[in-house]
Image (spheres, rainbow, N blue to C red):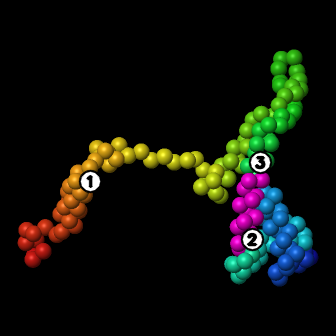
């Protein structure tokens, strides 16, 4: 007996097709994950798409661009989820029995938004990650130093660097 997975893999595309590649890129640009796209019967397995990407730099560039556009679609989707209340039913069990409470599914929507934003921060940290700001709290205020003071400071730093990289001259290298 042939399994469903085997039957499905037998009908899948394995050779590169421009039509399939275009559909994959279009769907990625809509924010749909590659593995979801590849679950469709007429689509290749996701590993096949990665093989195509490795073999064809132009296709790899198209995939990268489509994903980049798709990240914006996912961000817009997160905003839509946050802005759109969804009514759900919560059951409360009390002394007087079970009652249904209709309310906004705020916790579920929050989880959906946070998941999307965390994935975006991992996938594209330069665009969606938290901004990092580095402060220097050293004693030097370079903007307020004269050229002579800067030269002296650089000479002192260079002397320290040379001293720490030179082997000690105590004869220990002769033993």
Label for residue 76?
3
Tell me the CA gap for discs 2 and 3.
21 Å
Relative depth, front residue between 7 and 158: 158
Q: Is residue 86 magenta?
A: no
Left or right of 170, for residue 34: right
Please provide percent x and percent y for residue 146.
26, 49
Left or right of 85, for residue 150: left
The crowd level at tag 3 (other Cα within 10 Å; few <14, some 14-19, many 20+) is few
Magenta residues (range): 60-73
Give the residue displayed 69% in from the left and 78% down from the top. Answer: 57
Give the residue displayed 23% in from the left and 51% down from the top. Answer: 149
Label 2 close to label 3 by CB (< 8 Å)? no
Please provide percent x and percent y for residue 54.
69, 78
Of the image marks 3 and 1, the number of the one nearer the N terminus: 3
Label 2 close to label 1 by CB (< 8 Å)? no
Q: Please identify the dominant SS of the magenta region.
A: helix
Label for residue 147?
1
Please say if 18 is above or below 98.
Answer: below
Give the residue displayed 76% in from the left and 58% down from the top. Answer: 70
Mark 3, secondary structure of its residue = helix
Pointer 2 residue: 62
Residue situated furthest top in the rendering:
96
Please provide percent x and percent y for residue 14.
83, 80
Give the residue displayed 87% in from the left and 33% down from the top. Answer: 87
Res 82 quadrant in image: top right
């Amino acid at each position: 007996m042939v399994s469903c997975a085997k039957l499905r893999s037998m009908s899948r595309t394995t050779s590169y097709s421009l039509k399939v590649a275009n559909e994959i890129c279009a769907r990625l640009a809509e924010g749909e994950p590659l593995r979801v796209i590849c679950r469709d019967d007429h689509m290749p397995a996701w590993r096949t798409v990665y093989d195509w990407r490795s073999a064809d730099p132009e296709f790899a560039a198209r995939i990268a661009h489509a994903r980049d556009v798709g990240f914006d679609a996912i961000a817009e989707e997160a905003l839509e989820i946050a802005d759109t209340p969804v009514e759900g039913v919560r059951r409360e069990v009390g002394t007087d029995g079970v009652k249904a409470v209709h309310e906004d599914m705020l916790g579920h929507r929050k989880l959906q938004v946070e998941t999307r934003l965390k994935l975006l921060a991992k996938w594209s940290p330069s665009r969606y990650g938290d901004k990092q700001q580095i402060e220097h709290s050293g004693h030097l205020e370079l903007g307020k130093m004269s050229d002579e003071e800067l030269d002296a400071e650089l000479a002192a730093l260079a002397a320290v660097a040379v001293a720490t990289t030179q082997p000690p001259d105590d004869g220990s290298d002769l033993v």
